[in-house]
Amino acid sequence: MTNLDLGRAAFHSAIAVARDPSAAVGPRRWPPRLAAVAERLRGGVTAAAATAVPLAFPTLLLGLWILSARLGWLPAQILPDPALVAATVAEFVETGDLWFHTGVSLLRVIEGFALGAALGLGLGVAMGLSDRARWIIEPSFTAIAQVPPLGWIPLLMLLVGIDEALKVLIIAKAALIPVALNTHKGIRNVPTAWREVGAALTFGPWLTLTRIVLPASVPTVFTGIRNGLTNAWLALVAVELLASSEGLGYLMVWGRQLFQLDLVILAMIVVGLVGFALDWSLGRVERRLQRWELAGS
């Protein structure tokens, strides 16, 4: 910058100060109380925006649904009016049918998931602790894991029929695979140095397992449990669509057979909400476990 440019800058700065003397003082600072209030308002706006953004897409879909019903883009037999779906929800809530079918589905998931998670934990611990057990179990386990849960329905129908045992076994198989894989992974990834510390403290196999190996693998194991519960819920809906006389999947089939699409959409909404609630609840527990892991490290 030349001397002429510096002179022009100084001249313009002097004119600005003459017009507004506060310009020479520098940026204004708010009093501490006002600054604190402004910071709280800014935080509230940020939190509101963080809450609103995930709701933007569902709100858009709902708006398009309402607009389609009002303008007749699709026949009512294919996409019923949201008001009709709301009336169906109110009717099923009032009669108690919605709670009955939801309770039946939840009970099936609890039974199947408990069985599958218990077997998965046992297999995962065995493969993680013993190379011989892994050598014996892993080939058969891998082959079974490649067949999706619904692929077992024809065989299981011949063995156990189409009653509750079929549904519980299909759900258990869906939950077993991720629980076993993550349990195996979590135990195998425990640092060798930690085991050596247990040996230095004269820990036996049982104390090493309960005091070192299992606590260190809890976050990974819980990730498998969360994925197993998600798979169990998806398998439940699928098996209820094929062979059931009650439950949320049965409501979908019933609505399709009667050509009542409002009933189908009702069941879909409940399935989505319950699945979201289950995953959200386990997600919060998983985040707590992750904070424990960071604090322990």
Image: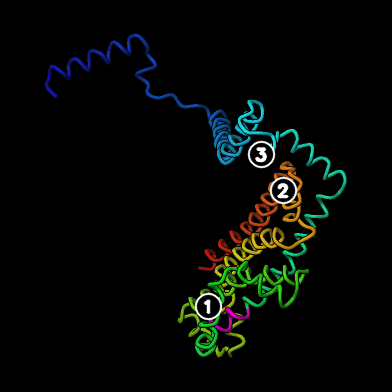
Q: Nearer the viewer, mark 2 or mark 1?
A: 2
Choose the circle earlier in sequence order: 2 or 1: 1
Distance between mark 2 and mark 3 Cα atoms: 10 Å
Tag 2: amino acid: Arg
Q: Secondary structure at mark 3?
A: loop
Query: Considering depth in this image, is 252 or 116 the residue closer to the camera?
Result: 252
Tag 3: amino acid: Ile
Residue 69 position in % (x across, y down): 66, 30
Distance between mark 2 and mark 1 Cα atoms: 36 Å
- The reply to whether residue 216 is visible in this rendering is no
Choose the circle earlier in sequence order: 2 or 3: 3
Crowding at dot 3, Cα within 10 Å, few <14 / some 14-19 / many 20+, comes out as few
Q: Are marks 1 and 3 in contact (CB under 8 Å)?
A: no
Within the image, what quadrant is residue 86 found in?
top right
- Disc number for residue 78: 3
Q: Which residue is mark 2?
A: 256
Provide the residue span drawn in magenta. 122-127
Q: Is residue 189 left or right of residue 69?
A: left
Q: Is residue 204 above or below residue 250?
A: below
Q: Is residue 293 left or right of residue 93?
A: left
Q: Is residue 22 left or right of residue 187?
A: left
Magenta stretch: includes residue 123: yes
Q: Is residue 258 above or below residue 6?
A: below
Residue shown at the point (73%, 53%) measured from the top left: 253
Magenta stretch: includes residue 168: no
Q: From the image, which quarter does the N terminus lie in?
A: top left
Q: Which residue is mark 1?
A: 143
Dominant SS in magenta: helix
